[in-house]
Image: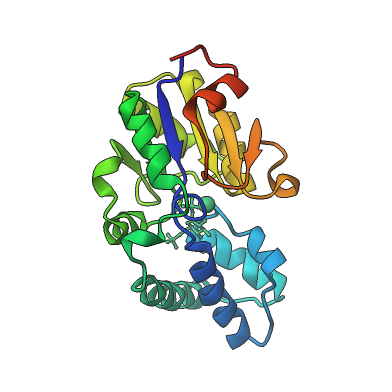
Amino acid sequence: ALQACLFDLDGVIVDTAQYHYIAWRELAQRYGFDLTLEQNELLKGIGRMESLDIILKLGEVDLPMEERVVQATIKNERYLELCQQIVPSDALPGVHDFLKELQDNDIKIGLGSASKNAPLILERLQMTPVFEALIDGNRVTKGKPDPQVFLLGAQELGVDPAATIVFEDALAGVQAGNAAGMKTVGIGQVDVLSEADMVLPGFEALQLASLTEALGFERI
Ligand code: G16
Ligand code: MG
């Protein structure tokens, strides 16, 4: 039976992807090129420095390491400035109800995010106490699609990866969950997340019983 659910943060619990996009786009524009929404899709779930390398490659800009660190810092400061506007009601629709249903059924809840800012965002949402395990970008050495972030989460919760569901909005994150031997639920568009065991537009009206049945778990 299902033992735990691991949640990505950006794009699953809260729509911070829009703020990442604004801050990365401003960086691109400083170097004279634009970053499209489609290109931004490639950055979801990918760590900060790796994302920067992808963007610079898209714009055919070559920067020494020192300057890349400076630019990544400026991007992060801008991102954090945009995140100041996050309030508890910004949790995506249906998230609170679904988490409550998990708690009521003694299913463990953990976070598996590539973001180094995850603790701060959870604080702004007043959601820190919900997560029994909090694995973020400060705690992993290998980014998604490596399974490390989710395997650490399962380990910290003391659950079997095969009895765990990962919720992800990024292809790299779905791949990480699959590589961890977990069931994966993509939150977003089917064309982007087709490698997930199942894709949902969001958490609205999601029922635990129908979810576990669809994923082949025994009845709780
Ligand atoms: C998130 C975002 C990525 C971002 C990464 C690092 O991961 O999806 O776009 O680049 O974190 O974020 P930061 O610069 O805050 O450390 P996730 O895994 O929560 O979707
Ligand atoms: Mg994400």
Question: Percent x, y for residue 152?
Answer: 39, 33
Which residue ends up furthest to the right in the rendered image? 191
Identity of the residue drawn at 47% across and 52% down: 93
- Above or below, 205 against 102 in this view is below
Quadrant position of residue 63: bottom right
Identity of the residue drawn at 72% across and 75% down: 60
Question: Percent x, y for residue 12?
Answer: 50, 50
Which residue ends up furthest to the front in the rendered image? 205
Counting every numbered tag in the picture gives 0
- Above or below, 173 against 66 in this view is above
Q: Is residue 181 found left or right of 171 in the rendered image?
A: left
Q: Is residue 205 found left or right of 9 in the rendered image?
A: right
Q: Nearer the viewer, residue 57 or 112?
A: 112
Identity of the residue drawn at 68% across and 80% down: 34
Tell me if residue 2 can be seen.
yes
Tell me if residue 215 can be seen.
no
Q: Nearer the viewer, residue 105 or 81?
A: 105
Identity of the residue drawn at 71% across and 65% down: 38
- Above or below, 63 against 1 in this view is below
Question: Percent x, y for residue 44?
Answer: 58, 56
Question: Percent x, y for residue 219?
Answer: 48, 13
Quadrant position of residue 81: bottom left
- Above or below, 148 against 31 in this view is above
